[in-house]
Image: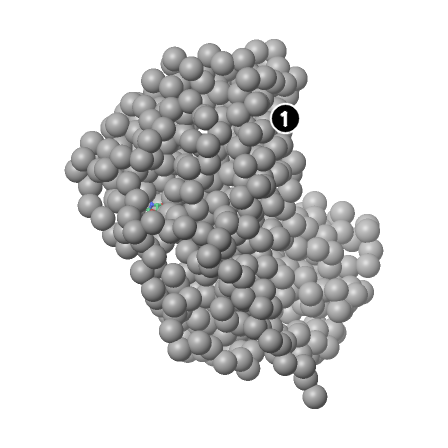
Amino acid sequence: MGFDYAPAPESRAVVDIKGSYGLFINGEFTPTIDGTTFKSINPATEEVLAEITAAGSSDVDRAVAAARTAYETTWGRMPGAVRAKYLYRIARLIAERSRELAVLESIDNGKPIRESRDVDIPLVSAHFFYYAGWADKLGYAGFGADPRPIGVAAQVIPWNFPLLMLAWKIAPALACGNTVVLKPAETTPLTALLFAEICQQADLPPGVVNIITGAGETGRMLVEHPDVDKIAFTGSTAVGRAIAKSIAGTRKRLTLELGGKAANIVFDDAPIDQAVEGIVNGIFFNQGHVCCAGSRLLVQESIAPDVLDALKRRMALLRVGDPLDKNTDVGAINSAEQLSRIRELTDAGSAEGADAWSAPCELPDQGFWFRPTIFTGVSQAHRIAREEIFGPVLSVLTFRTPAEAIEKANNTPYGLSAGIWTDKGSRILAVADKLRAGVVWANTFNKFDPTSPFGGYKESGYGREGGRHGLEAYLAH
Ligand code: NAD
C-alpha cells in the first residue's frame, strides 16, 4: 500500500503582484511611449497574473540612452570596490527576499516551488555574491593588468530559468563596469520586474540596470540598436542565428547560449539506482525545459532492461501537479505554445515507430501539462533523437562499446552538455575527453555553480557564462 501525501501548499500571500507593470528605465517604472500591452498568465491555472508592457522602439531608445549615460557618468568610472558594494547589497537582498522570489517564479513559470526555492533563487544570489567578489580583482583575472568594460550590454533571456538567466547576464556585466538593458521572455517577466524593485532598494544608480519587457520584436529592436556595444543572448538556435546575421559587419560583440540535445551515457558498471536518479534529474528537472537536459539516454545494451525497469518504477512515483505544492516534482509546461511543440515532436516519435511509455499520473484539468514520458526503440534518424523537445520526454538509445557510445553522443548538431555514469575513473576521463560538449558531468547531472563556466560547442552557441571565463565576455581586453 502506498502512502498518500497531504497537500503542502506554499503561501501565495508572500507576493504582491500588481495589476499592470510599466518599463524599468533609468531607475524608475515608466509607462510606454509607443508600445503595447500583453498578459502574463499562470501556466498551471491559465489565470491572468498581470498586464505587461511590450516596449516600442522609442522605449528601446530611452532604455539604451539611460544605460549609455549611466555608463559614461557613473558606473563605467566607478572603482571596482564600490561596484562590488552594490552587487553584494543586491545579493543580500535576493537572499532576504528569496521566499517571495521563489513563489513568484513558480507562479509565473510553472516550475515546482521545491526547485525555485532550493535551486533557482539560491543560485541567483550566489551568482551576485560570486561576481561581486571579482569586481575589484579584475586586474588579476588573466585579462591584462587593467581590463576595461565594453559599454552598454543588450541582454535577452528565455523563460525556463527566468531569474537565474538574468543573474548569469547581469552579475558579470555589472561587476566588469558595464551597464545593461535586459529583456526577459514574454511568458515570464514578473521576477525580472521584482528584481528591478530590488535594484531600487539597493540604491543602484539610475540607468545601470534597465528592464524592458516585450516579445521577440522588442528583443530584435534591442539587439539591433546602434548604440549597443555587446549582446548576450540565451534562447533558441534559430533566433541566435538570426541575431548573429543581423549584427555581422558591426563592431558589436556577441555571446550565444543556445539549445542542446545532451547524451546521458550509462555504462554497464554504473550503480544503477544512482544512475536512475541522475536520469530522472537530467530530464524531468524543470519539466525538461532545460537547455542542458539529458534528453538522450544512451544505455549499454546488457543493462538496458534493468535500467528501464528501474526507471519506470521511479517515474511512477513522480508527483506532477500544483507548482506551489512542496511535494510536487514536476510542474506545469510553461505555455500552450510549448505544450504544442512537445506534442508535435512526441507525435512524430510515435509516427516514426518509437514506443512511448508515460508515467501513470493524473493531470489537473486547467493549465498546461505533459506526463513524464520515455521513448524506447529510438533510432538516431528519428526526430526525437535529433531535435530539442524541451519538455519531460526522454529518448532512449542503446550501445555496445564505449566507442559506439561516444560516436552516438557526438552525433548531434548541438554540444552543450553530457553525462557519464560508470564506476571507473579512468573511463570517465577517457570518455569525457572525446565528448564535444561544453559541460560533462560524471556520476551526477544538472549541477550548477557560479564558479564553473557554462556554454556550448557547435549549434549550442559560443562564449562562456559563469566563473572567471564569464568575465571575458564583458571586458574589452
Ligand atoms: P526563443 O529564442 O524563442 O526566445 C528567447 C528570447 O529571445 C525571448 O526573450 C524572446 O522574446 C527573444 N526573441 C525572440 N525572437 C527574437 C529576435 N528576433 N531578436 C531578439 N530576441 C528575440 O527561445 P525560447 O523558446 O524562449 O527558449 C527556449 C530555447 O532556449 C531552447 O532552445 C533552449 O535550449 C534555449 N536555452 C538555452 C540556454 C543555454 O544556456 N544555452 C538556456 C536556456 C534556454
Pick the quarter of the image with the N terminus.
bottom right
Residue 34 vs 395, above or below: the answer is above
Q: Is residue 394 left or right of residue 228?
A: right
Q: Please report the residue visible at 41 percent of the width from the left and 50 percent of the height from the top.
A: 16
- What element does badge 1 sit on? helix
Sort mark 1 into few (<14), some (14-19) or many (20+) by Cα contacts within 10 Å.
some
- Using the rendered view, name the quadrant where residue 297 is placed: bottom right
Q: Is residue 437 visible?
A: no
Q: How many marks?
A: 1
Residue, disc 1: 133
Residue 89 vs 440, above or below: the answer is above
Residue situated in front as seen by the camera: 299 or 139 = 139
Q: Please report the residue visible at 38 percent of the width from the left and 73 percent of the height from the top.
A: 366
Q: Please report the residue visible at 20 percent of the width from the left and 31 percent of the height from the top.
A: 58
Rendering colour mode: one colour
Q: Locate residue 161, reporting x and y percent.
A: 49, 50
